Image (cartoon, helix red, strand yellow):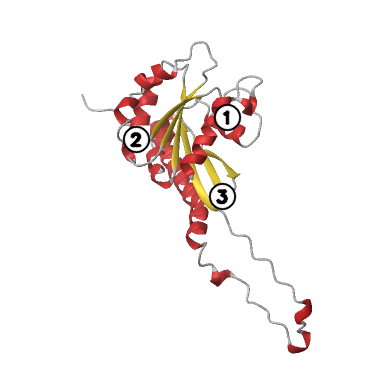
């Protein structure tokens, strides 16, 4: 029996997914490219500076001369990539970190969300890519561009845990040197698996002696808690430590 040709709808959806992935990759390069250029050029930015203006002889007044304040040094950039299946809490994590209240209901991310968080020594760009099936194909293209990977897992979604494990292992194999923080989210739900169970189900023991993999429990923005969730604070402190 001869194979049936693909329908126009399937071809159109495939083309749309490919275009979306290409646009996402370009936007990523532009977004993170700015930070990396600043880091590269920070020490030798003399070609972009204004020429110094020396006073004329009759303007020279040594006793009233004031030293110009040195220009503020531009902070270095650090990049954190947040991935995970759709509905695991990635967008809520970004909103809580940026001090915004979580949105009501589940609104999937088409493309990416990002926040820039200043710290004393550097700026942190936290970028989330949507977790729907058509976007997961492109995740591996961005892993080598960041300093830390955060992988969000819905601890109560037992049915899709094998898919989360599969995607996580793909990312771990892509860059063996990248620090990875696995977040066991939604621990406040009654059906949530414990951290010990998730460690077994996600197969993290196989990587413990090979690389930096952290598994942290969290209940990111459960009802009435907001940023006060101690798990969220712990994640942020660990990220700062890894980025330093």
Which secondary structure lies at badge 2?
Answer: helix
Disc 2, disc 1: CB below 8 Å? no
Q: Disc 1 designates what residue?
A: 92
Q: Residues within 10 Å of mark 1 (few under 14, many from 20)?
A: many
Residues 40 and 101: in front is 40
Q: Residues within 10 Å of mark 3 (few under 14, many from 20)?
A: few
Residues 171 and 132: in front is 171
Which secondary structure lies at badge 3?
Answer: loop
Horizontally, is 75 left or right of 61 in the view?
left
x and y, in percent, of residue 21 in the image = 43, 41
Eye-nearest disc, 3 or 1: 3
Q: Residue 161 occupies which quadrant of the picture?
A: top left
Q: Disc 3 designates what residue?
A: 121
Q: CA distance from mark 3 to mark 1?
A: 25 Å
Of callouts 3 and 1, which one flags the residue occurring earlier in the amino acid sequence?
1
Q: Residue at x 46, y 50 (%)?
A: 29
x and y, in percent, of residue 144 in the image = 39, 45
Eye-nearest disc, 2 or 3: 3
Of callouts 2 and 3, which one flags the residue occurring earlier in the amino acid sequence?
3
Q: Residues within 10 Å of mark 2 (few under 14, many from 20)?
A: some
Q: CA distance from mark 2 to mark 3?
A: 28 Å
Q: Which mark is residue 172?
A: 2
Of callouts 2 and 1, which one flags the residue occurring earlier in the amino acid sequence?
1
Which secondary structure lies at badge 1?
Answer: helix
Disc 3, disc 1: CB below 8 Å? no
Q: Which mark is residue 196?
A: none
Q: Is residue 122 above or below residue 87?
A: below
Q: How many marks?
A: 3
Eye-nearest disc, 2 or 1: 2
Horizontally, is 136 left or right of 205 in the view?
right
The single residue placed furthest to the front in the displayed view is: 63
């Amino acid at each position: 029996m001869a194979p049936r040709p693909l329908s126009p709808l399937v071809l159109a959806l495939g083309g749309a997914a490919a275009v979306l992935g290409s646009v996402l990759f370009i936007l990523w390069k532009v977004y993170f490219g700015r930070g990396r250029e600043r880091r590269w050029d920070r020490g030798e930015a003399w070609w972009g500076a204004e020429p110094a203006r020396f006073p004329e002889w009759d303007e020279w007044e040594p006793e009233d001369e004031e030293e110009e304040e040195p220009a503020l040094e531009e902070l270095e950039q650090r990049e954190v990539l947040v991935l995970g299946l759709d509905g695991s809490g990635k967008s809520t994590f970004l909103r809580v970190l940026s001090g915004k209240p979580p949105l009501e209901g589940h609104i999937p991310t088409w493309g990416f969300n990002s926040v820039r968080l200043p710290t004393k020594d550097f700026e942190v760009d936290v970028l989330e890519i949507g977790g729907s099936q058509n976007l997961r194909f492109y995740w591996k293209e961005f892993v080598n561009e960041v300093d830390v990977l955060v992988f969000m897992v819905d601890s109560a979604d037992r049915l899709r845990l094998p898919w989360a494990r599969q995607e996580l292992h793909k990312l771990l194999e892509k860059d063996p040197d990248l620090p990875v923080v696995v977040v066991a989210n939604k621990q406040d739900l009654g059906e949530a698996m414990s951290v010990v169970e998730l460690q077994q189900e996600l197969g993290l023991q196989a990587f413990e002696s090979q690389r930096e993999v952290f598994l942290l429990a969290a209940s990111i923005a459960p009802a009435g808690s907001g940023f006060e969730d101690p798990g969220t604070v712990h994640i942020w402190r660990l990220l700062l430590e890894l980025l330093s």
